[in-house]
Image (cartoon, rainbow, N blue to C red):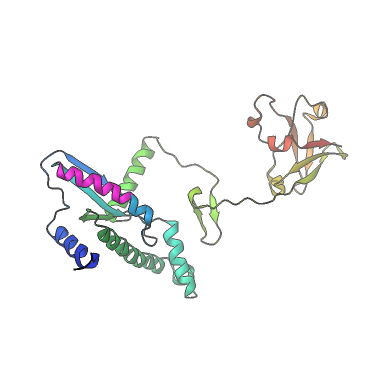
Amino acid sequence: MDKYDPSQIEQKWYQSWENQGYFAPSGEGPAFSIAIPPPNVTGTLHMGHAFQHSLVDAIIRRQRMLGRNTLWQMGTDHAGISTQLIVAEQMAAEGLKPSDIGRDAFIERVWEWKESSGGIISRQLRRMGASLHWETERFTLDEGLSRAVITVFERLFDEGLIYRGKRLVNWDPVLQTSISDLEVISEEEQGHLWHLRYPLADDPNQHLIVATTRPETMLGDTAVAVHPEDERYAALIGRHIALPLTERTIPIIACCAHRPTHCTAINRAHHTDYR
């Protein structure tokens, strides 16, 4: 052979190592285990995976050579919304939406994609020579793992360590589901300052003008805050304004000068004018 041909060497020897169980825990020394940070079944591995897994593989192989009972646990992750989006995009190319085929059929397609993508990832790791223990390979939605997650959540809830509460969430209008902050791409946009005239409830001829970049939040206002040491507003504290469009009145309150973040309307207080 004039030059090294990996296709003639690497696959044959890796298959031999795997068949002979060289990657299974077998040492007589103390146990040593690393669970692979599970790649997401959203496509294929990239250079970052190759770099990370090469470092872990070096650690694992050294521990085997030291005689420790060594396990490098293989697994893949479902990646939740990301995988759902990929399958939905595949269906869109066929002119279909998830709602067209129903929940059960869509879940079946997701599992089909998992088998396809997960198989590619496994082959890539083998091509890299990663000495993973394939016989114990797991997927984060395997029955046993899902049951374990539910059990732990119930236990934490019963112990008062976690609780359910109402929170603002990111909503995807296309997928019709909530998504995490990590799945949101933030973009800067040129804003605009809106000036809203709030008439005083007891004297509609006088107005409190509030400047804001979010006029739509006006409908949820519960108060308008003013600085207690600003002479322009001192006489207004305790009075009420008529909230436009809502047929409600809300109070004019004094914002704490030393702890402004405790004031719910502080963003409006700094831009308030009285006329």
Residue 121 position, x and y percent, is: 31, 61
The main secondary structure of the magenta stretch is helix
Above or below — where is 223 with respect to 76? Answer: above
Between 3 and 255, the one lying in front of the other is 3
Please determine whether, in this image, residue 155 is positioned above or below residue 42: above
Residue at 79% x, 41% y is: 242
Rendered location of residue 81, percent (x, y): 45, 57
On whether residue 42 falls in the magenta region, the answer is no
What residue occupies the far left of the structure in this picture? Answer: 28
Image location of residue 64, percent across then percent down: 16, 45
Identify the residue at horizontal 76%, vertical 37% (top origin): 271
In this picture, residue 5 sits left or right of residue 120: left
Query: Residue 17 or 69: which is nearer the viewer?
Result: 17
For image coordinates 66% across by 35% down, the residue present is 264
Q: Quadrant of the N terminus?
A: bottom left
Depth check, front residue: 173 or 87: 87
In this rendering, is residue 6 above or below 67?
below
Q: Which residue is at the far bottom?
A: 94
Q: Residue at x 73, y 49 (%)?
A: 192
| Residue 146 placement (x, y as % from top left) | 32, 52
Q: Residue lying farthest right?
A: 205
User: Which contiguous range is marked in magenta?
Assistant: 52-66
Q: Quadrant of the C terminus?
A: top right
